[in-house]
């Protein structure tokens, strides 16, 4: 029996070896083509499934018998007023949305014979077009103590706009006018003028201007945005200034990346009737044209956002035949370290800023109409910072900067002239001085949104200046800070408060006679705190009243040398909303 089994195994082994050899020979043969005839199509079927039934058998050696329980129910009636009701699903209470009106008018009056008036109206011409009108007036008849000159002022402007919005194109046209009246009332404290000379001073100045502009936005086009604006600005001393700015923005793709290119064309030309440095009435004319190109590339990678770019400017001083070429960096980056909680950011940016007469008046309305105007080259502003949202209630932003500027425009007090020709020649006006300046800047702000009704905010900024030629950074403070609060007490009552602090500033002291070869005397302007509040009460969706209090500490501080401000100012009025 065993011998037969051995023979069978031997035969099987020989057969397997021969089949392997044949398979190797077939692998070396060339694969040929064969014809396969399908007699019947394949029709798959699924057989019936049956659930396996199994009943486990209990083989426990110990089986406990259930005990029989005998009990009875003892019912006692209880007095109750409880009535079961069906439960209701909880829902968030939606606040009642206030009705929005297309128009409103505001009128208010206060001490110092002050008037505040505003009017706004929006006309929806059709589904895509609308037109708006905004008129603002703020004035005071003055009344600051211990002044010998008039200190009243007016400030009025009117804006008109038309906007059309379609799916692919948005464009708008705007026009406006402005008028401002001020008085050069800041005579030096030690002025030796006689009463007759003071009475002969014509301290009033009027500014006026007009503007017209247009904006354009296009989807899916190389020309993404466009802005055009023309302004005329003049005053009562025959000053005229024209400014034309054209700012198109282009976008195009290169290697799946979007490159944005901004073009800036800025022309400024005008003339002052008089050059302050000359006793004769020689006109002071200026004409400057700046053109720049600023391409940039934005890279987005997960939590990282980087903008790589630069700007190139060519500045032409047409009046003096002097041209300059500038290159500035434009690099920014931000990284989300902890989502929205911690965002690190930094950058280095620069650009060319053209100083104008209108810009000077906005900074300080008491400038003389004899300015020398030149562009300021912002060589670079390098900064790093952290910002974020610690919770739904707390936000923060901290930043440190190092800034380099060439031909920085500094406002300084003008000395009294030998020949008193105009109302600004008595040491009561200001003009520009230019110098190269380096600034170290530290900024921090924090905001608290306790609820939708109560919000707090605080900020502080520190400056450290380094000048090239000037003794000081004239009229620039070392510290600025602010504290703001908004509280919607009820649906009718609202309250707000703002406190501003400005540190000491340095100014030239023209009251002290100095030798030309010796540095001029410097006077320090005191720091000041300006506290303001506003209270509002809403009768309904249409009518509300308000009261405002400004400079509540009553300090007649000097924002500019020899120019004290009004003391405690109180103004009250009403606002009415309506539809035509």
Image: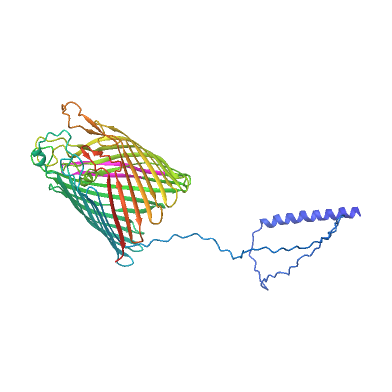
Q: Position of residue 80 (x, y in %)?
A: 64, 63
Q: Nearer the viewer, residue 4 or 145?
A: 145
x and y, in percent, of residue 499 in the image:
34, 43
Q: Which quarter of the figure is the N terminus placed in? A: bottom right
Provide residue 567's location: percent of width, then percent of height: 26, 42
The answer to whether residue 137 is left or right of residue 83 is left
Of residues 183 and 45, the one nearer the viewer is: 183
Q: Quadrant of the C terminus?
A: bottom left
Main SS class of the magenta portion in the image: strand
- Image: magenta residue range: 309-333
Where residue 20 appears, as percent x and y from the top left, is: 74, 54
**Residue depicted at 63% across the width and 65% down the height:** 33
> Is residue 292 toward the left or the right of residue 21 in the image?
left
Front residue of 411 and 407: 411
Q: Is residue 178 left or right of residue 37?
A: left
Query: Does 129 sit left or right of 79 as displayed?
Result: left
Q: Is residue 320 magenta?
A: yes
């Amino acid at each position: 029996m065993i011998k037969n089994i051995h023979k069978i195994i031997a035969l099987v082994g020989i057969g397997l070896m021969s089949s392997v050899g044949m398979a190797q020979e077939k692998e070396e043969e060339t694969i040929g083509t064969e014809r396969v005839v399908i007699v019947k199509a394949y029709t798959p079927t699924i057989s019936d499934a049956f659930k396996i039934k199994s009943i486990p058998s209990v083989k426990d050696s110990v089986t406990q018998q259930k005990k029989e329980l005998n009990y009875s129910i003892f019912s006692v009636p209880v007095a109750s007023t409880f009535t079961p009701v069906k439960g209701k699903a909880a829902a968030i209470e939606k606040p009642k949305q206030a009705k929005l009106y297309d128009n409103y008018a505001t009128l208010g009056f206060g001490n110092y014979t002050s008037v505040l008036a505003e009017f706004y109206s929006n006309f929806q011409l059709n589904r895509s077009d609308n037109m708006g009108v905004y008129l603002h007036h703020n004035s005071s008849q003055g009344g600051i103590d211990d002044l010998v000159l008039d200190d009243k002022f007016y400030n009025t402007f009117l804006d008109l706009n038309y906007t059309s919005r379609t799916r692919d194109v948005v464009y708008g046209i705007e026009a406006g006018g402005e008028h401002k009246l001020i008085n050069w009332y800041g005579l030096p404290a030690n002025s030796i003028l006689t009463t007759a000379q003071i009475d002969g001073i014509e301290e009033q100045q009027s500014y006026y201007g007009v503007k017209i502009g247009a904006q354009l936005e296009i989807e899916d086009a190389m020309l993404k945005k466009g802005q055009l604006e023309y302004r005329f600005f003049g005053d009562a001393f025959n000053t005229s200034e024209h400014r034309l700015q054209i700012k198109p923005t282009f976008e195009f793709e290169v290697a799946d990346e979007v490159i944005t290119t901004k073009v800036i064309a800025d022309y400024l030309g005008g003339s002052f009737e008089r050059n302050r440095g000359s006793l004769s009435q020689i006109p002071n004319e200026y004409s400057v044209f700046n053109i720049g190109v600023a391409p940039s590339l934005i890279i987005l990678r997960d939590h990282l956002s980087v903008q790589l770019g630069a700007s190139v400017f060519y500045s032409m001083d047409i009046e003096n035949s002097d041209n300059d070429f500038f290159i500035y960096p434009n690099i920014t980056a931000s990284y989300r370290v902890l989502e929205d909680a911690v965002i690190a950011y930094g950058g280095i940016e620069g650009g060319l800023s053209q100083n104008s007469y209108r810009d000077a008046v906005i900074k300080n309305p008491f400038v003389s109409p004899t300015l020398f105007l030149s562009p300021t080259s912002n060589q670079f502003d390098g900064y790093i910072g952290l910002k974020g949202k610690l919770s739904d209630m707390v936000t923060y932003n901290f930043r440190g900067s190092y800034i380099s500027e060439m031909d920085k425009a500094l406002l300084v007090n003008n000395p009294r002239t030998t020949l008193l020709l105009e109302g600004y020649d008595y040491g009561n006006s200001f003009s520009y001085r230019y110098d190269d300046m380096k600034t170290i800047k530290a900024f921090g702000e924090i905001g608290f949104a306790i609820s939708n009704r109560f919000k707090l905010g605080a900020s502080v900024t520190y400056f450290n200046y380094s000048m090239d030629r000037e003794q000081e950074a004239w009229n620039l403070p070392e510290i600025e800070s602010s504290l703001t609060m908004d509280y919607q007490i009820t649906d009718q009552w609202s309250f707000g408060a703002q406190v501003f602090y400005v540190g000491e500033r340095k100014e030239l002291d023209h009251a002290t006679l100095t030798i030309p070869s010796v540095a001029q005397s410097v006077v320090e302007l005191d720091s000041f705190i300006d506290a303001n509040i506003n209270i509002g009460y809403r009768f309904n969706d249409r009518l509300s009243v308000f009261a405002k209090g400004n400079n509540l500490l009553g300090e007649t501080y000097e924002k500019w040398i020899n120019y004290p401000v009004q003391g405690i100012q109180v103004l009250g009025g009403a606002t009415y909303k309506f539809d035509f």
